[in-house]
Image: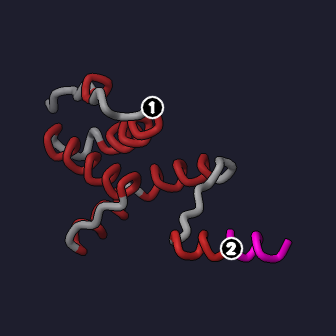
Amino acid sequence: MKPTIDIDALRTEHESDEQWEVRRNFMEEHKDDFEEGELITLAQLFTNIEFLGCRYPPATMKRIAKLSEKVSAKYRESRKNKLKRTFVQASDAAEQKAKRTFTK
């Protein structure tokens, strides 16, 4: 019989509530499919991809995408109505500011 994994004991002190919820959901979904060490690694890879934009070898990316389909869909759905940041290049921002300044 496979030992039970205490997922709640795996939260790290640097994780935000949002990151922990997503990583926890991933581990809950797959806790019966992997040994604890592999589960922790896969969950960390997933959150690195989702929150930090990390990239890994194509085979790893494909595997994580497949394993995270449900969790990703749920997370992205929850983000739809949240404030979104838009990043622009400094030169574009300066140009827009200059245009507003000179057109008044």
Left or right, 21 with respect to 33, comes to right
Q: Nearer the viewer, residue 59 or 29?
A: 59
Marks 2 & 1, CB-CB < 8 Å contact:
no
Q: Tell me the quarter of the picture where residue 101 sits.
A: bottom right
Q: Which residue is mark 1?
A: 17
Tell me if residue 22 can be seen: yes
Q: What x and y, as percent, mark residue 40?
A: 21, 41
**Magenta part mainly helix, strand or loop?**
helix
Give, as a three-letter code, the residue at label 1.
Answer: Asp
Q: What x and y, as percent, mark residue 29?
A: 37, 43
Where does the magenta region start and end? Answer: 96-104
Q: Tell me the quarter of the picture where residue 1 sits.
A: top left
The numbered mark, 2 or 1, whose residue comes first in the sequence reads 1
* Residue 99 part of the magenta segment: yes
In the rendered image, the residue lying farthest to the right is 104
Give, as a three-letter code, the residue at label 2.
Answer: Ala
The residue depicted at 51 percent of the width and 72 percent of the height is 89
* Residue 90 part of the magenta segment: no
Q: Is residue 97 above or below residue 53?
A: below
The residue depicted at 30 percent of the width and 61 percent of the height is 54
Density class for disc 1 (Cα within 10 Å; few <14, some 14-19, many ≥20) is: few
Helix, strand or loop at label 1? It is helix
Gap between marks 2 and 1 measured at Cα:
40 Å
Q: Could you tell me which quadrant the C terminus lies in?
A: bottom right
Q: Which residue is mark 2?
A: 98
Q: Nearer the viewer, residue 51 or 99?
A: 99
Density class for disc 2 (Cα within 10 Å; few <14, some 14-19, many ≥20) is: few
Helix, strand or loop at label 2? It is helix
Q: What x and y, as percent, mark residue 6?
A: 25, 24
Tell me if residue 11 can be seen: no
